[in-house]
Amino acid sequence: MIFFLIFAKQSTNNKLTNKTMKKTFLLTTLLAAALATNAQTYQIPVLENDEPMATGPFTPDWASLRTYQVPDWFRDAKFGIWAHWGPQCVEGSGDWMARELYMEGNGKYNYHREHYGHPSEFGFKDILPLFKAENWTPEQLVKFYKEECGAQYFFALGNHHDNFDLWDSKYQEWNSQNIGPHKDILDGWAKAARKAGLPFGISFHSDHAWTWYEPSRRFDLKGEKRGVKYDGWLTKEDGYKKNADGTDKWWKGLDPQKLYAQDHDFSENTWDNGAIHRQWGWGGGACLPTQEYVTNFYNRTLDAINRYNPDLIYFDVTVLPFYPVSDAGMKITAHMYNHSAATHKGKNQAVVFGKILEEDMKDALVWDVERGAPNQIMPRPWQCCNCIGDWHYNTGTYRRNGYKSAATVAKLLVDIVSKNGNMLLSVPLRADGTPDEKELAIMKEFGAWMKINSESIVKTRPWKIFGEGPIANADIKINNQGFNDGQYTKAGAEEIRFNQTEKYLYVTALAWPADHIIKVKALADGSELFPSPIKTIELLGYGKVKFTRTKDALEVTLPEAFNNIMPVLKIKK
C-alpha cells in the first residue's frame, strides 16, 4: 500500500527519470518489507500480565530467533531418553486414550466402558485419581537411563493433550499435586536428572486440548445409552450435585471445563475422527481458541520453565504452540532462550523443538521428526523422537511382543547420527511408574552395545557422506512430521553408515554380515572421499581386524558376531 501511493504520485507528476523511479521502487519495497517484518500481528495475542516474557538478546519474531545457535552440548549428546508418562497409562490401552474413550465403537471406548464405565458417568477426569505413581523411583530410573542405557539427556512429560499438568501447577487445578499421585512429578524428574548430571527436558502438549477433547461432548448413537451426553459438557456447578446414593462427587469444587476446555463451538467436521490431523495447524475449520485459553497455556509453560529450569522444551505441534494464529509460542521460545542466557552467563544453552518447519524456521528452532528421518545429512542439528512401543503404555504391545528390538533401536540411532541428528527415545512406563521386564531387557541389551560403541555416537559429527547401500541410495520421503522409520528398520549388513571425530572415521554395518565380510565402496583404493592410506582397522569391542583395499571397495574380515546388534569399525584418519 505504501509503495502504491508513492508510485501513483510519481506517475501523476510524470517528472521522474527512470533511474530515480527504480531507486524509489527499491526503497519503498524495502520499507514495506521492513514494516511487514516488525509489525507482524496475530489474531490471538497472548497476555503477559501474570507471566512476563523474559527480556534479553531474543525477541519474539523470526528475525531475532533465527540468530539462535544450537549449543555444542546438544550436538555432542546424540541420545536421550523420554519418560512419556502420565494418567493416560492407567488403562494400558495406549496413546490418545483420553480422546478415543469418547469414540463409540473404538477399541479404547469398548475397553473403558467394560472396565470403568460409560463415558457419560465415568470419563477421563475419573481416571485421574487412579493414577498413583506408587512405585515411581525417579532417581533410580534416571540413573539406569544414563549408566545402563547411555542416555546423554533426559525428558519428562509436562502435560499431554489430556490437559493434566504433572507438576504443582499455578495455573491448572487439574494437576498431579492435587489429584492422583499427590506429587510434583516434574520436580522429582528434574532433581533426578540434575543429580545424574543430565540435561533436563520437558514436553508440553496441552495446547491442543481445545480441539482434541471435542469427542468428550459426543453421545452414543446406539444402545441403551443412546443420546446420553458424555462428561465433556460438565461444569463446576455440576460437581455440587449429589450422586445417586447421596454422596458428594469426588471432584466437587473443581471445574471439568478447566480440564476438557470445551466451552466453545465445535470445529468443522467434529464427528470425523481424522479431522483433527488436518486441523493441527489451526486451519481446516478448527475452532480457534480464546485469548484466555492461549494465555493459560503460556502461563503454565512459563511457570514450569521458571520453576524447573529445563535445558530443552518440546512441543507436539506444527511449528510452535498456536502458530500462526497467536504469538504465544514465539514468546515462549524467546523467554526460554533469554532465561537460559540469564542463567548461563549470557550464553543461551537452551533447545526448543518444532515440527513441520519451513527451512528458515530451522535456524530458529531445532527441527523434530517424529518416528522418522530425512535421508540426507542435514546442515543443522535435528532430532528424531521415537518410542520402543506406543507413546503411552500399551499392554497390547507388551502381550504381542510389539516392542522394537535392541538392534532396531541401535540401527535407528546410528542412521540418525550419521545425518547430523539426535534420537530421543521414549520408554513407556506403567501407571505405577515402572517399566516392564521386556522393556528393561531391551534397554539393557542396547545399553551393553552402547558401552562398547558409544565413542562412535557421542561427540561425533557427520562425515562427507552419511552412508551407502540400497536404503541410503533410495528416495525416502518424510510423511508430514515424520513417520517413515519403517523404511530404516529393514536395513541389513549391506547398509553402511559413517560418522567421525577429529581423528577417527567410524564405519558401521547395520547388521552382522553372514559371510563375515564388510564391503565399503566409499573407502575403495583411490577414493576421493578417503585418499589417505589405511594402516589399521579396529573392530570396537574386539581389536584389530584384517582387511584388503581394492579399486572397488574396502573389504574387512570380521570374527564371529559377539553381540546381536551390529559391528562398528574404527579407522584412523
Image: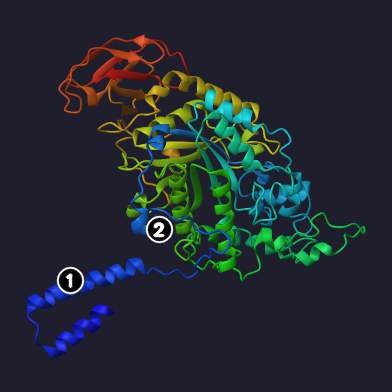
96 sits to left or right of 524: right
Q: Earlier in the sequence, mark 2 or mark 1?
A: 1
Alpha carbons under labels 2 and 1: distance apart: 27 Å
Q: Nearer the viewer, residue 256 or 553?
A: 256
331 sits to left or right of 374: right
Q: Which mark is residue 573?
A: none
Residue farthest bottom in this picture: 12
**Residue that mark 1 sits on:** 26
**Residue that mark 2 sits on:** 59
Q: Position of residue 172 (x, y in %)?
A: 66, 56
**Mark 1 nearby-residue class (10 Å; few <14, some 14–19, many ≥20):** few
Measuring 74% from the left and 44% from the top, which residue is drawn there? Answer: 182
526 sits to left or right of 517: left
Secondary structure type for disc 1: helix
Q: Position of residue 477 (x, y in %)?
A: 36, 46
Q: Nearer the viewer, residue 546 or 158?
A: 158
